[in-house]
Image (spheres, rainbow, N blue to C red):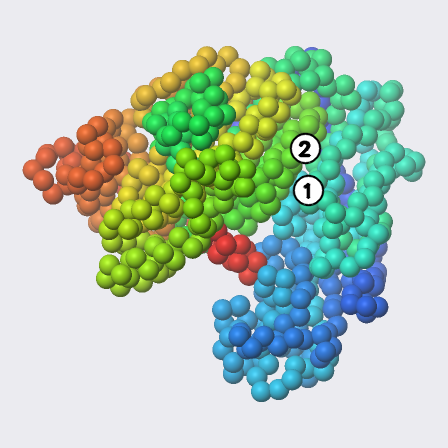
Amino acid sequence: MPGSTPFSRLATVALALACAPVSSCDRSSGPEWLPLDERLALDAPAERRSIPLPWRAGRSAELVAEHGGATLHVSIRREDWHFKPKLGVWVVPIELFMPPRAADNAVRLTTPQGPVSHARPAQLASKDQHAFTLVEGQLALSWPGDAPPEESTLSCAVLERSRSQQHRIDQGAFSGRGLTLLAGERASCRVDIGPGSALRFGTAARPFLGPVAESDGCVFRVRLDGEIRFEHRVRPDGEPGSQWHVVPLPDDGVHGARLDFEVEGSPASAMFFEPTLGPREIGRRGARPWKDARADIVVFVADTLRADSLAAYGGQPGITPHLDELAGRGLCFARAWSTATWTLPSHVSMFSGYYPPQVLPPDARTRLPQAVETVAEKLARAGYRTGAITGGGFVSSQFGVDQGFGYFLEESGELDELLSEARGFLDADDGRPTFLFVQTYRVHWPYHASERTRSELGERLALRGEADKLLDAVRDEAHAQGATSVRVQVDMTGLPSSPRMAELARQMHAHYLGGVADLDRDFATFLEHLRSSGLLESGYLVFTSDHGEGFCEHAAFFHGRVPFEEQMRVPLLIAGRNLTARRIDHPVSLIDLAPTLAEMAGVQGQPDWPGRSLLSGGAKSGAIFGFEASGNRNDSLFVLEEEKKILCVPEGTGARLVGAYDLARDGREEHDLSATDAAWPQELLGRHGASIRTLITPLVQGEAVELDADKLAELRELGY
Ligand SMILES: [Zn+2]
């Protein structure tokens, strides 16, 4: 990549050095924060050692720890296997917590006769070979014609610690700055501790092997010049998230102090997150003992929330009272479009500031390339404490979305658990301005309305039955109407219309809205926390979604298809300091989010970002663009000018018109004007042909992502 592109890290570093990082602004009057993660040197025992693990009534697994990581060996006897006739495979319930993106050879199964070949879960069913796989907490073995082997050993690299990643935690749900220790290991550094300092960090432990057998947990410890200053015991199975700690240090400071971080106890990945030296007295947000005008920023993405779910956007009143109240308190962008129809390209676009095809070259299985500098990286470099709590799926370290976040937790649990983690992160304030990103799949398929919502709103929404049963009914109706396309079966597109289908769509929408009401209720408690912690005065809250959801308006359910309005329109609310309530009616796009966040934080954006900051209400942007971004050559995109919208497909050096809608008269996009004698669609396409070529031209090389079986299973659960 040429050095002159906006992505050049060298250029960025040079720029940062020339301007001096923002964290040193106000240094004359403010404190300094010293991240210790990169200073800590691992002091792991050099020799190999074995650690017995409890496993099945007195049997033990063996953990072999080395400087470069750890390997687990589990011996399996013939009687441990159970046959699953339906699948034709033998299974043993074993959950191995491997590092994500572990190479296939990170896990091996060997018998006295030699190694068994590893297969992808989908390939295992072919019954003519000896092969194994690990999927969804099961070790599965294809062993044709015979009982499984008398003895075998499963070996797995459960912790990989290359020199380059030593200070990056990468342990499944957890990633971020910091380090992973095994029991018995220690990491140390020497550092000058200023007067009035404190040490802050997070801890989390994750077992290597599940279901977790009886375990005493492990003890996290910090020593200052040999003396214990901090001790904390955790059970690896008991605490899903992280805990955050403050360790006060001697009043007068210590010159050349030695700090040791150590772990003892049961084998587990024991993580120290973002160990940082900073001021002990930090006041509170908006009222620091030093001068700091930088804004705290929280971005909340309610995945798959279409704009008209909110009354503020024309939806039914009473479903989202708290979001509607928020809409009335700050900037409410009444006409906001996402840049993509599905999760990964939309998030990559939000956090890179570029359109999906520019940074995710065609192929749905790519990740956010490292060469792209994300908004989180910019803010981290400027001295922000950056964290993300997400629902996982595509919003995952495996897809590179963690880039720039000092702490990144992806969890598929309930929304209230996720928000409790988010509050924990906020409460662990260390005085630096905070950038927190929260993402939830609460309203995403599979739709789920809580009992409370069913009793409060069930009648009004005419909420009946279960959503997954409705999906079967949709398929049945499609077949009854003569639909034969496999698309109906696979992705619920190409559906025929009928009165029955319309009623099923209404019922699906009711279930979806039930989930929206639950989202609103949980969000309200989080919003209250932001208010009471002072964050809404000291900073900003952005509430939005990454795309909408279809309910058969255009022969499809769900999202990720042609960028019609139901898939592209999202709520966009900004509340916080100095913002007076205002409704903004001109069209805006989530491409504007990155420049908006940069302005909030007072950092420079990329000069060639296509969007513009919305903070002052948003300068009128030109046209709005949005992409199907499913990774196919014939992906469609839309271009919108005020109320006129065209759909087109790039072709040769231009683009072919495939639809045109006048949203002022036809908000539901029912009357395609592309084949009529209306001249404006071709004219609109003509005006933006050159822009389209630019926006679909990749600025970076794509990075393929290799997904492990667990991630594939997790995505399947979400319907991908
Ligand atoms: Zn999404």
Q: Is residue 147 visible?
A: yes
For image coordinates 35% across by 34% down, the residue present is 569
For image coordinates 45% across by 24% down, the residue present is 324
The type of residue carrying mark 2 is Gly
Left or right relative to 83: residue 502:
left
What residue is shown with label 1?
241
Left or right relative to 576: residue 663:
left
Residue 532 percent across, percent down from the top left: 63, 20
Point out the residue furthest to the bottom here: 145
Question: In the rendered structure, are the residues bearing label 1 and label 2 in contact, judged by CB atoms less than 8 Å apart?
Answer: yes
**Residue 424, disc:** 2
Going from the N terminus, do you reach mark 1 or mark 2 first? 1
Q: Residues within 10 Å of mark 2 (few under 14, many from 20)?
A: some
Relative to 561, does residue 77 appear above or below in the rendering? below
The type of residue carrying mark 1 is Gly
Q: Nearer the viewer, residue 37 or 107?
A: 107
For image coordinates 54% across by 31% down, the residue present is 521
